[in-house]
Amino acid sequence: MIERRIVSIFLPQFPIERWQRQVAQQGNAPSDDLPQVLAIDGPHGPIIHACNRAARLLGVSEGTRVVDMRALCPSLRVNPADLQGDHAALTHLALWARRWCPWTAADGHGLILDTTGSDHLWGGEALMLEEIEARLSLLGFSVRLALASTWGAAWALARFGPVRAISRGPADLAPLPMAALRLGEETVLLLHRLGLKTVGDLAAVPRLALMRRFARAALIGNPLLRLDQMTGHLAEPLSPSDAPPVFHADVRLAEPIFDPSHHLPHLCEDLCARLDHAGRGARHLRLSVYRTDGEVSRIDVSMAAPSREAAHLVFLFRDRLERIIPGFGFDLISLEAPTTEALGGAQTNLAGGIDEMLELSHLVDRLVMRFGAPALSRPLTRASHIPERAEARAEPLAAIPDAPMPLTERPLRLLERAEEVRVLYAVPEGPPAQFIWRRVTCRTVRYAGPERIAPEWWQDKPGTRLRDYFKVEDDNGRRYWLYREGLHGDGRGGDPRWFLHGIFS
């Protein structure tokens, strides 16, 4: 059985360092010699959330009131903290950390990486930790790292162990303080009063004695559960915000580049080979470039039908690569297929030709790439006799039907709203002899009908009148689809009204 390996990345000064990095990007880099703090609202006034090195050297600490620290340090500069921005940035950094392994998640002021089976790609666990530390240091973040077989052990060693700690057993955890168990302050204080100072002290106490005291405590207040998580007796799975895709292809570069177009064909061929082996086709693709400054740029494309044709996938990205902001360059390119569908082998028809529906899906993909998805739609049939209800519009990237819609005797082109016309007819129940539509008089030469359509009683309002549809051709050869709403003496209104609903091609 493969031993699980978890890396905990602790960023102790992440809020203040992110703020300094953000201010520096705006061209207003603060001096490192000035005491700077970030403050949040507290029950008795603002309290300090984070402070830089100059402030810590003057005795300023997190969790204290701003007014007290200003008395200690009159030159203290206070800025508002952005808790939501810190959380979003840390989540974004967790996605960027997938350059080392596919399973990553944010964890307080740090990250958790499941690097099981990934360390050999970096020359071993020690070299992998050095690579992670160097990358984050280039981004301007202070970092402490630890690698262990459980989440709890890695978390504890990253915060209370040596630099770049690699745990090989319980002996490395025994000297750690009680706070390394991720317990609440009240629980840690209680254990200290009981004489338990370290993890080893807690492990030496009989479980039955502690179980009686903490049996009903929540996870943050139960030292036994936290100890079991640290030692691996209680599972603690890693749940990232979004699971990594099953089908993906990566290119790692020795030096940063600014244009991924040269590597895109190889990525598509590699991804399509994986899809072909699994009998799947991609419906959605995501191209991600991991920049050296910690940012991730993405381009998403969708297909009208599942596909694993590399040339077609490359074409879909052709005019979208300009949207990537390279920054100082990127050294990792990833192509993923988050959404796939079953796709069998392609087969030609009896005449040796290609599938027409496949060509239609490729045409839809090209039109969407050129004009955007909102500019295109396709018709969907519905079970209704009322013409305007029998057809709906769907997004072009929805699944295309296996066969084209059958043609009917109704016009393919309907007006968005039926337009009322004035008619002159010889027989009340017959077709119009002539009608005026948009101030143009049309004289009827020939006609067909009527086709009577009754109201749908299960959804129409009471009093809705029936319709009699006529196909009418005028003296200029144009063919129209008109209907008479209601009948004389039907008791549902006055005289019948006439509307033009469609035009035959």
Image (spheres, rainbow, N blue to C red):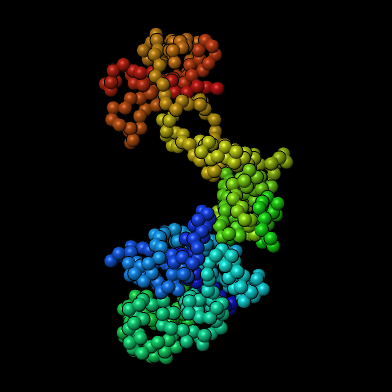
Closer to the camera in the image, 66 or 347: 66
Q: Residue at x 50, y 71 (%)?
A: 10
Q: Residue at x 44, y 66 (%)?
A: 35
* 464 relative to 165, above or below: above
Q: Which quarter of the rendering shows the N terminus?
A: bottom right
Closer to the camera in the image, 372 or 262: 262
* 239 relative to 272, above or below: below
Query: Seen in the image, is 273 located left or right of residue 382?
Result: right
Residue 354 visible to the viewer: yes
Q: Position of residue 95 (x, y in %)?
A: 54, 61
Query: Seen in the image, is 374 located left or right of residue 181?
Result: right
Q: Quadrant of residue 36?
A: bottom left
Q: Which quarter of the rendering shows the C terminus?
A: top right
Residue 273 visible to the viewer: no
Closer to the camera in the image, 482 or 181: 181
Closer to the camera in the image, 369 or 258: 258
Q: Residue at x 56, y 56 (%)?
A: 296
Residue at the extreme front of the image, as rendered: 74
Residue at the extreme left of the image, as rendered: 491
Residue at the extreme right of the image, as rendered: 352
